[in-house]
Image: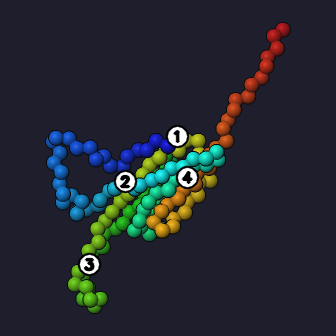
C-alpha cells in the first residue's frame, strides 16, 4: 500500500569518493522523517519539515503516487543599512513519494503546524464482488 520511493540514493560505490563540501554548495536534498499510521477508515502521514513555510510546500497525487515536496530558495544579501555586511542562506529541497492505491485522492486533507505536515488519506471502500447462486436445470 505505502511503498516508499527514495528521492536520493545514498549508496556509495568504490568509484565514488565522499565529498564533504558537496552539501555546502547548491541544493541539498534530504529525506524528511515520516510516520505513517493506519486505522479502519484512513491513513495518516506525518512528515517533519522544520524551517519551511507553508508557501514552500507542494503536495500532489498523480497516477497513484503521492508526492510531498518542500523547497527553499537561496538568498544572498549584501546590505549595510541593516547592520549586516553579508547574509547567506543555503538552498534545500526535500521530496518524499508514496504509492497510495486504495485511497480517495479527492478527499485527502493536509495541515501544516509547527513544522509537521499532516496528511489524512481516507480509504476507498473495499469492493466485494457480488456472488450469485446459479441454478442448474
Closer to us: 53 or 58: 53
* C-alpha gap between disc 1 and disc 3: 45 Å
Q: Which mark is residue 38?
A: none
Determine the residue positioned at 51% across, 50% down: 36
Point out the frontmost of discs 2 and 3: 2
Point out the frontmost of discs 1 and 3: 1
* C-alpha gap between disc 1 and disc 2: 20 Å
Residue 34 lies, with reference to residue 111, above or below; the image says above
Secondary structure found at label 4: strand
Secondary structure found at label 2: loop
- For marks 1 and 3, the one nearer the N-term is 1
Q: Which mark is residue 31?
A: 2
Secondary structure found at label 3: strand
x, y percent for residue 133: 79, 19
Determine the residue positioned at 26% across, 78% down: 87
- For marks 4 and 3, the one nearer the N-term is 4
Point out the frontmost of discs 4 and 3: 4
- For marks 1 and 2, the one nearer the N-term is 1
Residue 60 in view: no
Q: Which mark is residue 87?
A: 3
* C-alpha gap between disc 4 and disc 2: 18 Å
Determine the residue positioned at 17% across, 45% down: 16
The answer to whether 20 appears left or right of 92 in the picture is: left
- For marks 1 and 4, the one nearer the N-term is 1
Residue at the disc numbered 4: 44
Determine the residue positioned at 55% across, 63% down: 111
The answer to whether 61 appears left or right of 33 in the picture is: right
Residue 80 lies, with reference to residue 103, above or below; the image says below
* C-alpha gap between disc 2 and disc 3: 26 Å
Residue at the disc numbered 1: 1
* C-alpha gap between disc 4 and disc 3: 39 Å
Amino acid at each position: 500500500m505505502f511503498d516508499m520511493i527514495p528521492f536520493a540514493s545514498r549508496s556509495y560505490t568504490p568509484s565514488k569518493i565522499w565529498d564533504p563540501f558537496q552539501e555546502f554548495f547548491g541544493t541539498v536534498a534530504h529525506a524528511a522523517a515520516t510516520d505513517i499510521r493506519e486505522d479502519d477508515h484512513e491513513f495518516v502521514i506525518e512528515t517533519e519539515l522544520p524551517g519551511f513555510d507553508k508557501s514552500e510546500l507542494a503536495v500532489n497525487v498523480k497516477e497513484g503516487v503521492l508526492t510531498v515536496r518542500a523547497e527553499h530558495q537561496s538568498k544572498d544579501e549584501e546590505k549595510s543599512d541593516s547592520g549586516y555586511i553579508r547574509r547567506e542562506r543555503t538552498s534545500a529541497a526535500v521530496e518524499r513519494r508514496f504509492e497510495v492505491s486504495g485511497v480517495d485522492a479527492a478527499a485527502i486533507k493536509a495541515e501544516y503546524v509547527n513544522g509537521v505536515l499532516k496528511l489524512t488519506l481516507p480509504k476507498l471502500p473495499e469492493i466485494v464482488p457480488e456472488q450469485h447462486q446459479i441454478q442448474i436445470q
